[in-house]
Image: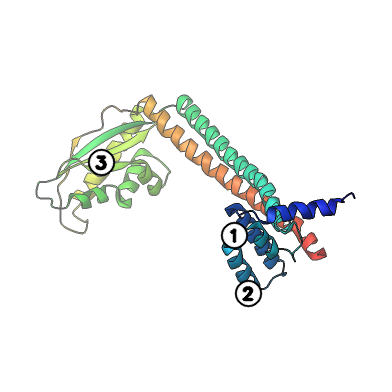
Amino acid sequence: MRTGPEDENAAGASGRGHLRASRADREQVIATLKAAFVQGRLTKDELDLRVGQALASRTVAELTALTADLPAGLVKAQQWPKAAQVKARPLVSKVVTASACVILAAATLGLAAGLGFAALSPPMLTSNATVVLPSSVRDISTQVFIATSDPVLVRALRTIGSGESPQTLRSAIQAKNVTTNIISISAPGRTAAQAERTADAIANSYVAYINSPSRPGPQVQARILAPAVGATTKPLPARLLALSGFGALYGALIGAVGALAFIGVWQHSRRAGKAPADQSA
């Protein structure tokens, strides 16, 4: 008498039934029970009960009995959405990589532009003039502030015949105390003569203002200690480093803004593409 495939499968299953269950066998059965619970085939109490029985089972036959009333393939059916998510990850990774490449390319272009500008543009020269104050002056920081105030700079701009604003000149110059009663005033210029003239104009304007008897506050007798003579400029390596760094930073910021805009458009298009499918469902 010949046996069919069903009899052979039954015989194989009964042959394995007496085998001791392994940890992998128990984990597989528990995964099937959890999948059945998610699909609504088991209640929470039934799930807890069967999971406890699976953990206590000693043979394959005992484990098989726990899933005998459940269809096969539940674990695979439960896992397919995760597989779809895994397939979506490479697309997100490509978008992030493309955005990083945009930022890197923009920073590189900014770096190159900064290097080119530093190499081809004429260097800005700087000249210094110094003013000495009486040793009785207590607050030198206040005098430094006055040296770059609007009344002083307006008079200096009239002297050099410049039409720029005091705010613009203030952002270009630098005043600092060298000692407790000496102030150094630095001014830039395209040429040495221009830098010297601007520094001297500010220093003379400050002395005239601070020595004026009509000025409110205590009288201070200041004088020019050393007029601006000669001009210096930053070494080329320092200029290259400063301008290239600024260019790279500026380019990276522009690239980041562009990348964020691209990601926003991409996310919006994805949501818009999913909306019809969700509505039809």
Q: Give the left or right position of residue 138, taking residue 30 as reference.
A: left
For mark 2, does the 10 Å Cα neighbourhood hold few (<14), some (14 to 19), or many (20 or more) residues? few
Nearer-N-terminus badge (2/3):
2
Instruction: Give the mark nearer the N terminus: 1 vs 2.
Output: 2
**Number of marks in picture:** 3
Report the residue that reaches farthest toward the right.
1
- Residue at mark 1: 58
Q: Secondary structure at mark 1?
A: loop
Q: Tell me the amino acid under the disc marked 1.
A: Arg
Q: Position of residue 15 (x, y in %)?
A: 71, 53
Viewer-side label of 1, 2: 1
Disc 2 marks which residue?
45
Mark 3 or mark 1, whichever is nearer to me: 1
Secondary structure under the numbered disc 3 in the rendered image: helix
Q: Circle 3 is placed at which residue position? A: 203
Structural crowding at the residue carrying mark 3, measured as other residues with C-alpha within 10 Å and reported as few (<14), some (14–19) or many (≥20): many
Residue 198 falls in image quadrant: top left
**Cα distance, mark 2 to mark 3?**
90 Å
Up-down: is 169 above or below 264?
Answer: above
Q: Residue at x 60, y 70 (%)?
A: 48
- x 18%, y 49%: residue: 140
